Image: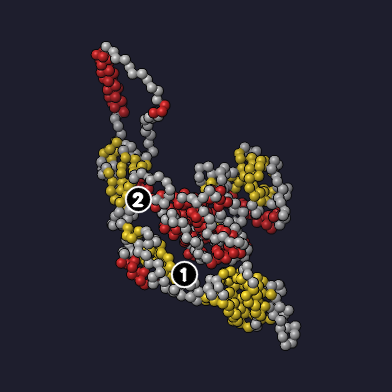
Amino acid sequence: MARAPDLANTVLGGRYELLELIGEGTFGRVYRGLDRRLERPVAVKVIKPWWAEDPVWVERFAREARTLARVNHTGIVQIYDVANAADAPYYVAELIEGGNLAERIRRGPLPPAEAVDIAEQLSRALAHAHSQHVIHRDVKPANILLDTDGRVKVSDFGVARLADGSSHGAAATAIGTPRYMSPEQARGARISAASDVYGVGVVLYEMLAGRPPFVGDSAVEVAVRHLNDPPPPLPENVPPELAAVVERSLAKDPGQRFADGDAMADALAAIPDRVLASRAAAPPEPVAEELTAPTSAMRTRIADPATRVARPAPKPTRHRAGRRRRLVALIALLVIVAGLVVLLTGGSSHTRVPSLDGLERAAAVNRAHDRHLRISFSSRYSDTAKKGTVIAQRPRRGSRVDENTRVHAVLSAGPRPVPVPSVVGRNVDDAKSALADAGLQAHVTRKPAPGEQAGSVIDQSPASTATAPRGSTVELTVVQAPRWRTVTSFTSKGDGDGQSVAFRIRGTRWRLAYDMRYDGDCSFLLVCFGPSADITRVGADRIDNFDLHEGNSETHEVSSDPGIYQVTISAGRDAASWSMRVQDFY
């Protein structure tokens, strides 16, 4: 295998000193460096020599690097410079001290609150890139850096493509990492911001479960799983609200996912902190959270008992009357001084408590801080007030209080929740009736499920072990009636060579539907030797073989167990053109 040269202890462009190799990827090597001119640490990525041999690729690299340098966001590793060394181009970027998310996940799954925080930061950063028409296309834990303060920095846009212009011409090439690749990337179809949302969904799933949703023995098998398989259930400690966000981000159809990073970040931010904290193995939170207004205040320091020095008790004295007189004089002096302070300063500052009724949490905090007041919150159920708005406060509005006084506000927690009935396994109409009787609504999503009864409920969210606010919606997944569904399609390349395609079959019946015609005359007058098809199960022997016949809408049906299969089309002696669709019945 070819290896790129180690450039440690060299200087690029007379400016960038390469100190040590700290990483390596498909396109280049990353070095810890020093910008001699500005005397600051940097990261330098040098492209591998064999990529630099293609002038078209080098020009595209330079053009896209300049574009990415304009994507200025605190959550994205910033590019400082782009230049050329003797053998290859390189770019200079912000150096992030800290590890990456892959290293963090290797220590075990993350608590839901920590995973949501990272995923929200990641989504916001990608949203900014999306606003600049840049798609990352390789979102994975190794490309997500965590600085020493726990802030997310997205790195390595090395396979990114602009979402307009010439990038569409390269859409037929699947670029990315198979474990984190969206279904449209696996098919080589056009990508969008929703493709990055899928990558964030896979990363969030892995943070919560400790492993990605789809693995396999080969890249082909993993890609097929992304195309066809639903993700396995998340661990029980994952709240239903968070599981629903993960499920939507991993939808096979890009149109059913969050449209971009901002939409996914908003969904994550909407999950209440108490829901996430209740699933984390952490000490219980205090009943009320206090937010202090930005005013200065004196703090009394209490000495650690362990540091106190034992002093002998004072001996009794006979001059107690004199000591009392001196103490009275000292107190009188302090009173006089305090009076002078009040006279000179006008006494303590006062303010009036504003009305917080109907405000959301952030607005209530701002209004309290405007009056130099502290604020704390609790919550209770309310059938009339919008969830998250203030329904009571103490002291009441208009009260005159000292600055820095704490105001306690009560937020509406929405209607009191009701138990969610179990409707999995029931007919969809019966399930809707049961939910209506419980005061809940139903939203039905139909999906194919081989081997299950059409019209039956196979999943519900929230689950029957949860509660939900009265009037809220329960998502039901209902088995769709079986029909022929196209799994994949492909055509002859016109070069006389054969072609091989792998795919997953979920039902027990499937077929190859094709159109075929000969190009020109046959080699023999009476018989044409056209293409033939071999069908094998991956990892097993051949299960079928047939010749393609000339004509339109030809079909060849197969009965087999569900699994991953491969069709290999061998070119015949006589040139022919054909197109084929693999159709599964479920």
Please name the residue that numbered disc 1 is placed on.
447
Residue 121 is labelled as none
Spot the residue most to the top.
318
Q: Is residue 244 visible?
A: yes
Image-based side of 250 in relation to 157, left or right:
left
Q: Quadrant of the N terminus?
A: bottom right
Amino acid marked by disc 2: Glu
The residue lying toward the viewer, choosing from 37 and 308, is 308
Amino acid marked by disc 1: Lys
Look at the picture and state if 143 lies above or below 524. above
Spot the residue most to the bottom.
526
Other residues around mark 1 within 10 Å, as few (<14) / some (14–19) / many (≥20):
some
Q: Residue at x 53, y 57 (%)?
A: 212
* Circles 1, 2 touching at the beta carbon (< 8 Å): no
Image-based side of 203 in relation to 526, left or right:
left
Q: Quadrant of residue 158?
A: bottom right
Look at the picture and state if 159 lies above or below 487. above
Q: Position of residue 159 (x, y in %)?
A: 61, 56
Q: Position of residue 197 (x, y in %)?
A: 51, 58
Q: Quadrant of residue 237?
A: bottom left
Tell me the SS state at disc 2.
loop
Image-based side of 221 in relation to 300, left or right:
right
Please name the residue that numbered disc 2 is placed on.
360
Q: Position of residue 407 (x, y in %)?
A: 31, 42
